[in-house]
Image (cartoon, coloured by chain):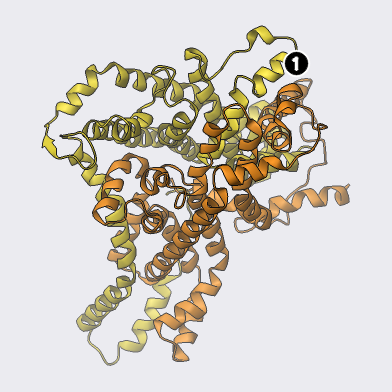
Chain colours: A orange, B yellow
Amino acid sequence: MTTTAAPEARPAERRTAPAAPPPVRRRRRRGDALGRTGPSKYLAHAGVWLYVLLLAAPLYYLVISAFKRNTDIFNQPFSPFTPLTFDNFGLAFSQASLGTAMLNSVYVTLGAELVTLLLAIPASYALARSKGAVGRMVERVFALGFLIPGFAALVPTVLLSISLGLFHTREFLILFLPASALPLTVILLTQAMRAVPAELEESAVLDGAGPLRVLWSVYVPLSVPTLTVVAILNFLSFWNEYFFSLVIIGPDAALRTAQVALPTLSIANAAQYGVLAAGIIITLVPAYLVYAVFADKMESAVLAGALKG
Amino acid sequence: MTTLTTPHRPSPDSSDRAGSTDRADSPAPRRRRSARVREAAQLSATIPALIWFLVFTVGPLVSLFSFSTVNWRGLIAPRTPAGLGNFERLFTDPVVGLAAWNTLLQLVVSLPIVVLGAFMLAYYLSLKPRGHRIMRALMFTPVLLSASALAMVFVGVFAPKGMINGFLDAVGLDELARPWLADGTSALWAIIIVTIWCSMSVSAIMLAARLNSVDESIFEAAEIDGAGHWRRMWQIAWPICREFIGVVTMLQFLWTLFASAAVVLLLTRGGPGNATVTLAFLVYDFAFNQSKVGYSQAVAVVLFVVGVAGILLIRRAFRQKY
């Protein structure tokens, strides 16, 4: 019995590892989860699977439509066995200049990631080491930042970009997006760096390392797990950013990001879902790749994002 | 913030050690001052981040309040003071009234469904039934969708010849088919459904992670006492996760209030007529399509106040009770 249960228990242990060591955890048998509940368990299973079906249906429709000809989308909307075509992907690329748009998105996302880390790492390092009241106050300032809903300041942000001479540029977003990511990034990194044992730092200092050297050789390597979580979280929010890119970078095909370019496909192809579906899939690829590579980290990243309240 | 457990470094211990080496040669006051100087030097590393935060987050937010009191026809047009005129106009403007009603409806319908539904799903997932891993992977997909990708997925779902009408046609209910987004009543419900679709699964995954960190012996004790799953879910799991459920509710509240503006813009542009306008959408629409910049900022101030009030209210309602 225990051999069949062992693989199930593992993911739970991984998630809770920092909180509680797992040796006493008792295991449930597979398929037996609602075992002792009466007939109502069928209701529960049915309800959940109905939900899963409703969740999956638009995604299924999206994926099969991307590989279909338009007439097949209309005539056999749910059949996966219609003639396969890749034309939609080519059309999506050419109609919305998606190639340029994807490169713009990569530029903005990576630029903003870099600026975020350059600002957040030294700040977190200082906050983690400081024990005084000022440090606590600065930390509280960042914690309050969570409560600020950025969307309310849409118009003033546009004005800021105009007054900096950066309206209709991608560079303004590279500078602006890190500000929205800083509170969470700084708080999570500060916590990770507080957990660095003081002895390590002391021995580095005895070896003659200055503060920068200590940061680079002791703190940064030891906070790599949190750095990864933070980077994933920021990658997703930067890559998927829509409203500020729309109003600040604007609709110019040479500068706009993928998220701004994508909706133009729906206007250009009012009755052709295939091209739009292909476009959606193309813009999803980078986010999906990050998910595929860091699947186990993703959950803790999203969880960390939730905890910011 | 209270949900984050802060692993403090054993600070009294290490400062004692530093103190004991100094004590012999330097008098106490100077040592305290030099410690303060050292702290200031250390904290100077936070200055760039603070400047960023001030310029790009706090600055725009503060100017929001002053912009809401001017008459202003376009981003490059001159401004003239309007006092509180913009706010007085808000209360008599039927479009703003409709937007407030739609926003309220969206919140009142979607918040309970998402939070209660996500909690039940999370409890189900935490039992690790057959297929739970496939379910999790599927439920994660909406996290990866941007607002524009999400809206575009549903362009295909609600289109006159889209998924829903195709389905109704296939099961012989084609008289129910309609252009969902062009119909005044169904369009608003379509927006609400999109909101629920994309956020319920995310909330469920977060809640499931929280439930997995609960000590299982609590549930086992309840099981031995004869409590069924229904009672364990609402009388044990819910109170334990109460505070975290509050966090999820808060995120959902903010998301519905602000981020759904993109969904409205991309699916209906507030139409047909003004049937689907929301407050957040009006902030954008007034400023960028109708040349009423000052007026749009008054809406934004209202939205901001509602947002902060909502956060405080939710936080109070979900305060841990034991």
Horizontal side of A62 relative to B287 (left or right) equals right
Left or right of residue A246, residue A20 in this image: right
Q: Position of residue A137 (x, y in %)?
A: 29, 59
Secondary structure under the numbered disc 1 in the rendered image: helix
Read off the residue under disc 1: B170
Tally of numbered tags = 1
* Quadrant assignment, res B212: top right
Residue appearing at x 44%, y 59% in the figure: A112
Q: Residues within 10 Å of mark 1 (few under 14, many from 20)?
A: few
**Residue A120 placement (x, y as % from top left):** 41, 64
Residue B9 in view: yes
Q: As displayed, is residue A156 above or below residue A134?
A: above
- Asked whether residue B128 appears in the rendered view, the answer is no
Above or below for B192 versus B313: above
Q: In which quarter of the image is residue B253?
A: top left
- Where residue A286 sits in the image (x, y, percent)? 61, 53
- Residue at screen point 63% across, 42% down: A91
What residue do we see at 37% from left, 36% from top?
B311
Instruction: List x then y, in percent, for residue A106.
Output: 52, 57
Q: Nearer the viewer, residue B69 or B231?
A: B69
**Pick the front one: B123 or B76:** B76
- The subunit carrying tag 1 is B
Position of residue B85 in the picture relative to residue B163 (left or right)? left
